[in-house]
Amino acid sequence: MDLDRTDIAILRCLQRDARLSLRLIAKEVGVSTPTVSARLTTLTQLGIVKGYAAVLDPERLNETTFVLLVKARPPSTDAVASAIAKLAGVRRVLVARGGRIVVDATVVDPRDVDAVLEKVAGLHDVVDVDHHVAIRALKEEPRAILADALTTSLVCYQCKGPIKGEPIKIRMDGRDHYLCCTSCEKLYVERHRKLKAAA
């Protein structure tokens, strides 16, 4: 699904400063405040906007940041990555090709780096662990690059599978819902009616 210029402009405003009010975003983008609110609701439902947070600098807080490069047995990569994600201090986990897992972690006490390493190395199906302690950050930018033309991959609200081609879009309770086929649409509408009746 393609995002239009309004969506992209709203995302640029938020990525620059997530504290902007809907009114200020609307003024900058050239649309109404209700339009910004509705677009943000949809962008959040689609999983494009994951949340709003202040960006804090761990270095200024005298914390230690480090990167783990983990090699796992390929059939168990996702399970190992999920186990690592639950560990204290782990901030971000990326699964790469070939059973590789890249982990960003932060600890308050530098001595805790060894404790994290031991826990990761002790996980079942971990083949190798390497780590690098950061001494300074030279650049930190938002991960999303907001080009002039953007598309998003939709996930079916019923079967949770990827939607290929044009989605079926239905509006219920003031929200847009995206489905991959008429079968999922029927099941989703029935489930929604049952939940509403039970409430």
Image (spheres, rainbow, N blue to C red):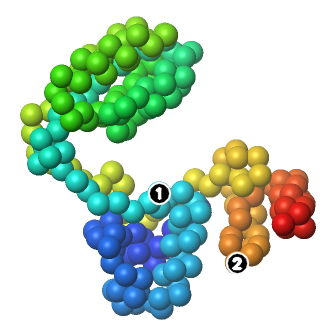
Q: x, y percentage for residue 108?
A: 21, 35
- Visible residue check, residue 164: no
> Element under label 1?
loop
Q: x, y percentage for residue 22?
A: 42, 82
**As drawn, is 68 to the left or to the right of 133?**
right
**In the image, what residue occupies the spot 16% across and 27% down?**
110
Q: Quadrant location of the N terminus?
A: bottom right
**In the image, what residue occupies the spot 22% across and 30% down?**
66
Which is more toward the observer, 36 or 108? 108
**In the image, what residue occupies the spot 54% across and 17% down?**
76
**As drawn, is 101 to the left or to the right of 180?**
left
**As drawn, is 16 to the left or to the right of 182?**
left
Q: Quadrant of residue 14?
A: bottom left
Q: x, y percentage for residue 183?
A: 88, 53
Q: x, y percentage for residue 35?
A: 53, 85
Residue under numbered circle 2: 174
- Looking at the rendered structure, the kind of residue marked 1 is Lys
- Say above or below: 39 vs 129: below
Q: Which mark is residue 154?
A: none
Q: Indicate which disc, 1 or 2, sits on the residue closer to the N terminus.
A: 1
